[in-house]
Image (cartoon, rainbow, N blue to C red):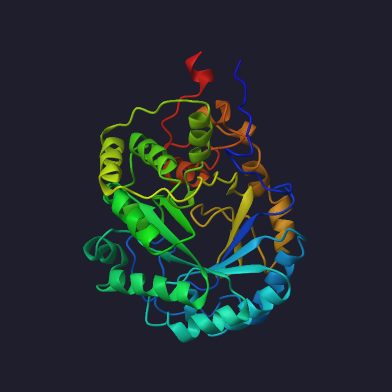
Amino acid sequence: MSVIPTRPARTVRTMRHDPNERPFIVIWEVTRACALACAHCRADAIRARNPLELTTVEGFRLLDRIAAFGTPRPIVVLTGGDPFERPDLPELVRYGTGIGLHVALSPSVTPRLTEPVLRELHDAGATAVSLSLDGATAAGHDGFRGIDGVFDRTLQAARTVKDVGYRLQINTTVTAGNAHELPDILATVVDLGASLWSVFFLVPTGRGSRLGPLDPAGVEDVLHWLHDVGDQVAIKTTEAPHFRRVALQRAAGTVHRPGPLGERLRVATSASGGVRTRPARPPMDVNAGRGFAFIDHLGDVYPSGFLPVVAGSVREQHFDDIYRTSPVMRALRDPDGFGGKCGLCEYRQVCGGSRSHAYAVTGDLLAADPACVYEPSATRD
């Protein structure tokens, strides 16, 4: 019989509140409009704003409902598309911070991202900005973004973000085509003074369905490599909750034998001589629908932006009621009900697998995560 591993506080961080009652983080896609044409775009972003977007007043009401969860209140990230396409963005930020919410921004690097606008939003109360960097060179990153020159503008924007006084987060989407660039991207992330490197593992949805995700062995190699370099910058993963399983295994002394990709990453990192600057930050136990929720530009609520299963609409129900009572959300908070090896895994309570990967590949959001290579002890007995 399998024993579910414990979660030492220094190995995996847990929420300070019941994830059944309130989320840790809420992502609101304030618009789907964006001037870029990113190859991996989850949202199939469009050039013009949708006239059916949540209005400013509806946005205020949504922020009220998020604040109604009480303290500690969820972190709110305003994303898109490109949130800077909304002229009322300063109003939304000012209102949200005025009612006690921590508001962060996730803009695209376009001509709308200027120092005056960043200063206005900082004055309105926004505290953090995340920017995407998906290649170590202009050729790689600009190829992802669909427009030449974005790489150089991203580096400049990152420096401006820091100069204005924001915390800087760098987001990187990992695919089979750019995984080998991760050590060089890491060096840039550290050089820019980012507070957090958020590494997204490609889910084949939206435009991303046309790109090649890593195979499970490659994902495992990258996760172990990220664990090894976590003392250079704080790291979180998106759509790879098995990073927490890796942290627990490594804390227990498990030795990972890297495959070809892992060995290439290890050699490249050793050659670069990365500077170890901080204790590694333990990963956070947050998953789709369990501490995390996404609201699209029309007000539909999803467990994740990469999991296109609607849990409700804020135009029909209060957001807090949707989060707490939706059958979709409740099912995702019960790992014992997951199918295949995820439901049998001794790490299911701390990991649970990527529900988005499971749904994208199988059409079943409760199925086993096909991107995870780990074989639970129950399947080996």
Residue at the left extreme? 139
> Is any part of residue 89 visible from this angle?
no
Question: Residue 215's image quarter?
Answer: top left
Residue in the picture at 27% in, 72% down = 147
Q: Is residue 162 above or below residue 354?
A: below
Residue at the top extreme? 381
Residue 112 rendering spot, x and y as whole percentages:
42, 82
Give the mark count: 0
- The front one of 180 and 253 is 253
Residue 371 rendering spot, x and y as whole percentages:
41, 38
> Is any part of residue 294 visible from this angle?
yes
Side (left or right) of 37 relative to 10 = left
Residue in the picture at 28% in, 68% down = 146
Q: Quadrant location of the N terminus?
A: top right
Residue 331 rendering spot, x and y as whole percentages:
65, 42
Residue 324 rendering spot, x and y as whole percentages:
73, 52
Residue in the picture at 68% in, 70% down = 63
Residue in the picture at 59% in, 82% down = 123
